Image: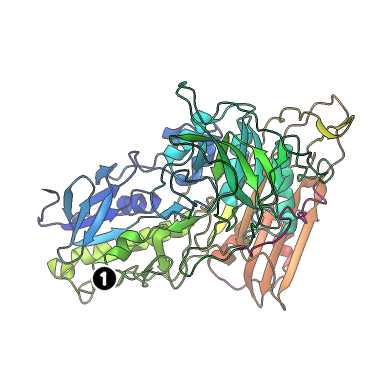
Amino acid sequence: MTTTGERNDRHRVVVIGGGMAGARLAQQLAGTPEVALTLVGEERHAPYNRVLLAEVLAGRYPPDVITLPGSGARRLSGVRAVRIDRAARAVHTDDGRRVPYDTLVLATGAGPVLPPLRGLFPSAGPARPHPGPSPRLPAGVRPLRTLDDCLALDAAVRPGLPAVVIGGGLLGVSAARALARRGARVVLVHPGPYLMERQLDAEAARLVRDHLTALGVRVRTGCRAHGLRTRPVTGTGEDPGTAPEPVTPGPATAPGPAPGTGTDPGPVDRPARPHPGRTSGRHPAPGTPPPATGAGPDPEPGPGPAPGPGPVAVRAVELADGTVLDARLTVLACGVRPRVELARDAGIVTARGVVVDDELRTSDPDVFAVGDCAEHAGVVHGFAGPAQDQADLLALVIGARAAAGPAAARPGSSGAAPAGDRRPPRYTGSRPLVRLTLPAAPAPPATPAATTGPGRTATPAPPTGPGRTATPAPPGGPGDTATPAPPADRAPLPARTGATDRPDPTAATAAAAPSPPGAPAAPVAPLDLAAFGEPTPAPGDDVVQLSDATRAAYRKVVVRGDRLVGGVLLGDLGAVGALARAWEGDEPLPAAPLLHLLTTDGGPR
């Protein structure tokens, strides 16, 4: 066993996790002479801005553009921490190293939730959510959580490729837009009543849906994925995730909603064979993690022969109502779950995340946690801004701890600064604001005619209303409003029985009149979005709402007493500055009428 980082006169800080939180902490500690920092990261890449992965997939940025600034810290890349020896204060890694520490920081982040889809784990029986590193999935199936995920999807996507995105939260919307921008034929499947329901209300979600539909994305809400259909991968050398193979048609598809609503099944949907005796809405066993967004809790295999031994590739996604979606690429955007296994195995207190106090200290006084893995006051954020807030504060805490000398490194030490010194600030929580830029895009390819009955065809045209796709800005500081990962504490939707492809309340107004035959499609205009807090008012809350359909502008704030509790702004975000300050600072609103906050920039009126 190799021991690295042996003791010298500097305070040894080991950070497990090379993501955005760990990299930010390393940057903040770079100028602290008393600290010797080691960053242990599983990924082989230098730390990067995870928020912009969808933009790399969309082709807007090359991968090197999203690399974060270096810190000068000693970095162990492609190395996984496998055990924490708290008694010896050392981290053991998978390559046999032993890394001693005086202060240990857990920045292990969150892993993608792999939903319980039949066929997701071909060699491991029924599927189950997986909290750690992703196991081998069928070719063509990936989450979008790491740069390697992004590069694999980038290599597989091509114009005309049928793709399905499972999950319509922030990440799912961004992934669907990115694939559509690359020319794929995308279907977005979401179990909620409308897209991004944690951040948006129905009216705002309609504008986002308009945007995706204008790009050529077919959106199916109120709809749950049940399983994958796969095929054996032959030794032809072709990319198994992209090789075309027709889906065997089943009985004729029942008529769906009118074209243009975004819920038309389209020509590639085929009913699956019934599953005798299958029941939906099965409850998991006690202690089983909740099902993830975009997938239901039906892990049992259906009838039919299973693929033989060897690798397989996805060919279709089966929905709970029996519809089958052609798919050579499937993106799992079903949320994330904090990675707490390392801490839990070491005897550190965990709940949904690694439990920390106001100085981000865990139940072990020499171990701290920040970012997506940390749970403070019962909250796991899963946002870039709070992770940076925490890293900045922890840098002050560790700086004071290092300045206190060896006494602060003793087990059981409080780590407080010497007497007479000002104590570091305490973390009281974050109030993130989500901001997305959905940029302009060229018109999507013409949609082929869909057969609706014997001798009849209908040519669906995407709605002409604006709508775009998410281009988050790179985070720039603690107040960063970049697009977050799906929240780790998202509650599962209630199990449904019977038909699951229910009407989206946003779809009724999302449809536009079909374009004349042969008319060129209009380019997709940009759309900006900002959201914070709870968009749905509670009884007694005040709501101010302005909407201008001709400008694709929508603004809504929810007020309780003299405080903002939530808001959604789409279109011109000129008013977002004042609202963001009031929200992030939890400041009382001015005495002026609230309408003034929404119209001072000449917005919707």
Q: Position of residue 322 (x, y in %)?
A: 69, 48
Taking 25 as reference, is 55 above or below it? Answer: above
**How many neighbours does mark 1 have within 10 angstroms: few (below 14), some (14-19), or many (20 or more)?**
some
Q: Magenta part of the protein: which range?
A: 493-510
The quadrant holding residue 243 is top right
Q: What residue appears at the point 27 percent right and 45 percent down from the top-left corner?
A: 79
Badge 1 element? loop
On screen, residue 129 above or below 211: below
Q: Residue at x 68, y 68 (%)?
A: 558
The answer to which of 147 and 33 lies nearer the viewer is 147
Residue lying at the far top in this picture: please name it. 236
Whether residue 240 is in magenta: the answer is no
Q: Please, which colouring scheme is shown?
A: rainbow
Q: Quadrant of residue 423?
A: bottom left
Magenta segment's dominant SS is loop
Q: Residue at the location (56% across, 40% down)? A: 305
Q: Position of residue 360 (x, y in %)?
A: 35, 67
Can residue 272 be seen from the camera position used here? Answer: yes
Residue receiving disc 1: 364
Res 602 seen here: no
Q: What is the x, y in percent for residue 524?
A: 72, 36
Residue at 25% across / 62% down in the picture?
A: 399
Residue 44: give x, y in percent of width and height.
Answer: 32, 39
